[in-house]
Image: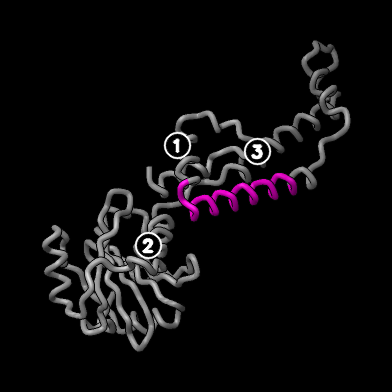
């Protein structure tokens, strides 16, 4: 199990510890104990759920006598249901609490696009072992990628000339290969990730870059032909400057 799989599983983990004995959750918890970054994320997730639960309890206090009222509903009564407003109100409160609890305490899993963006940003921010093959020669980089069975039929932004290339690596995302090209342009560090379009079907096909800040970095994501492109940089203006010269 990798960090991405563990994160998706732990998003459904109940903070009370009821799921700790489940083998699937146990494996994800063990992965979190081994990885400091995942462990930090899990602690923040638990803290957020605890705060939401506290706010929910304060916002909708449980009425006094709720338990006795609910038990009374189980008894056979000759009084029509429309003469029992207090009991109906108590039942409505329970349903509301349950609905809000499910909504707040069990957040929806990340979309594939958000997961891809977050994973690539972690690689972009990685300092040690950032690139595997170092070269300022784009032709040499393409040859290295081809030697590992990676397709190189992708379009680089015209504002990222080959001489600004620092190297590359191949990263794994959900069993799909994504090529990372590292650039330094006018002293600014950027990484371009390229992956097959079929690996990320939920990317909006707007024809324009989608700018989102993730993990302290700005990202721009777009598709062209059969490829997905994701560019990371320090700020949105930098990415826009690079991409405004590129036909997407």
- Give whichever of discs 1 and 3 has the lower sequence position: 1
Q: Quadrant of residue 169?
A: bottom left
The residues colored magenta run: 34-55
Query: What percent of the width, then of the height, locates residue 180?
Result: 28, 67
Query: What percent of the width, then of the height, locates residue 176?
Result: 27, 52
Left or right of 147, for residue 220: right
Viewer-proximal residue among 198 and 40: 40
Q: CA distance from mark 2 to mark 1?
A: 24 Å
Q: Which secondary structure type mostly characterizes the magenta part of the structure? A: helix
Q: Residue furthest right?
A: 64
Residue 204: numbered disc: none
Q: CA distance from mark 1 to mark 3?
A: 29 Å
> Label 2: how many residues lie within 10 Å, few (<14), some (14-19) or many (20+)?
many
Q: Quadrant of residue 221?
A: bottom left
Viewer-proximal residue among 127 and 112: 127
Q: Is residue 119 magenta?
A: no
Q: Is residue 47 magenta?
A: yes
- Above-or-below relation of 7 to 195: above
- Give whichever of discs 3 and 2 has the lower sequence position: 3
Q: Which residue is mark 1?
A: 27
Query: What percent of the width, then of the height, locates residue 190?
Result: 35, 76
Q: Which residue is mark 2?
A: 120
Q: Residue at x 43, y 60 (%)?
A: 118
Q: Residue furthest bottom?
A: 186
Q: Quadrant of the C terminus?
A: bottom left
Judge depth for marks 3 and 2 and give the one in front: 2
Query: What percent of the width, then of the height, locates residue 238?
Result: 41, 82
- Above-or-below relation of 188 to 99: below
Q: Which residue is mark 3?
A: 99
> Label 1: how many residues lie within 10 Å, few (<14), some (14-19) or many (20+)?
some
Q: Residue at x 52, y 50 (%)?
A: 39
**Element on which disc 2 rests:** helix
């Amino acid at each position: 199990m990798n960090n991405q799989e563990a994160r998706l599983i732990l998003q459904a983990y109940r903070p009370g510890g009821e799921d700790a004995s489940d083998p699937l959750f146990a494996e994800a918890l063990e992965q979190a104990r081994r990885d400091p970054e995942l462990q930090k994320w899990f602690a923040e997730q638990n803290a957020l759920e605890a705060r939401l639960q506290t706010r929910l309890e304060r916002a909708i206090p449980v009425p006094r006598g709720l338990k006795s009222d609910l038990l009374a509903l189980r008894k056979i009564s000759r009084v029509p249901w429309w003469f029992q407003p207090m009991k109906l109100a108590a039942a409505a409160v329970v349903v509301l609490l349950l609905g809000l609890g499910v909504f707040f305490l069990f957040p929806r899993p990340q979309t594939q696009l958000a997961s891809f963006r977050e994973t690539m940003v972690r690689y972009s921010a990685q300092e040690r072992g950032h690139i595997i093959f170092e070269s300022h020669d784009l032709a040499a980089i393409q040859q290295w990628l081809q030697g590992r069975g990676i397709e190189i039929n992708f379009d680089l932004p015209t504002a990222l000339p080959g001489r600004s290339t620092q190297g590359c690596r191949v990263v794994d995302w959900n069993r799909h290969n994504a090529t990372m090209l590292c650039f330094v342009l006018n002293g600014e560090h950027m990484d371009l990730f390229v992956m097959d379009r079929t690996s990320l079907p939920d990317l909006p096909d707007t024809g324009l870059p989608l700018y989102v800040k993730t993990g302290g970095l700005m990202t721009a994501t777009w598709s062209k032909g059969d490829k997905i492109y994701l560019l990371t940089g320090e700020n949105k203006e930098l990415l826009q400057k690079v991409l405004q010269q590129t036909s997407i």
